[in-house]
Image (cartoon, rainbow, N blue to C red):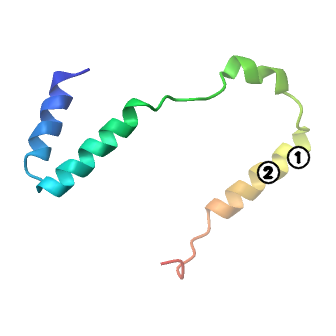
């Protein structure tokens, strides 16, 4: 692990009140047991080509249309 990152974390934690320091410690401890899970791309290649091109075009169009709109009332 980078000693730079550790020193920056310590530097920032020293400025926090003790209750927030405790929260950070608990968070870090919770991360120690976590591991990333997923499926490799190599395993997913077996599914390549299952979705017909015309359906992919429909999905692409829906994504583009949905992403280009802004809902001003959302906030």
Which residue is at 20% across, 55% downward? 20
Residue 18 placement: quadrant: bottom left
Label 1, on which residue? 55
Residue density around tag 2, few if under 14, some if 14–19, many if 20 or more, within 10 Å? few
Secondary structure of the residue carrying numbered label 1: helix
Q: Position of residue 11 (x, y in %)?
A: 9, 40
Total label count? 2
Residue 25 placement: quadrant: top left
Task: Please give left or right for residue 7 compared with residue 47 in the image.
Answer: left
Which residue is at 68% across, 56% downward? 64
Q: Position of residue 43 (x, y in %)?
A: 74, 19
Q: Position of residue 7 (x, y in %)?
A: 12, 31
Secondary structure of the residue carrying numbered label 2: helix
**Quadrant of the snapshot with the N terminus:** top left
The correct choice, above or below, for 54 with respect to 19 in the image is: above
Label annotation for residue 47: none
Residue 9 placement: quadrant: top left
The correct choice, above or below, for 44 with respect to 8 in the image is: above
From the viewer's side, name the closer residue of 70 and 46. 46
Which residue is at 58% across, 29% downward? 37
The residues tagged by marks 1 and 2 sit, at their Cα atoms, a distance apart of: 6 Å
Which residue is at 52% across, 29% downward? 36
Q: Confirm or deny contact between disc 1 and disc 2 (CB under 8 A).
A: yes
Task: Please give left or right for residue 41 compared with residue 24 in the image.
Answer: right
Query: For the view shown, which residue lies furthest in the bottom direction?
Result: 73
Label 2, on which residue? 59
Q: Position of residue 6 (x, y in %)?
A: 18, 30
């Amino acid at each position: 692990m980078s000693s730079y990152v550790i020193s920056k974390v310590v530097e920032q934690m020293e400025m926090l009140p003790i209750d927030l320091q405790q929260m950070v410690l608990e968070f870090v401890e919770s991360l120690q047991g976590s591991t990333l899970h997923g499926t490799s791309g190599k395993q997913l290649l077996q599914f390549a080509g299952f979705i017909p091109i015309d359906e992919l075009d429909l999905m692409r169009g829906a994504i583009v249309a949905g992403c280009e709109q802004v809902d001003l009332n959302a906030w």
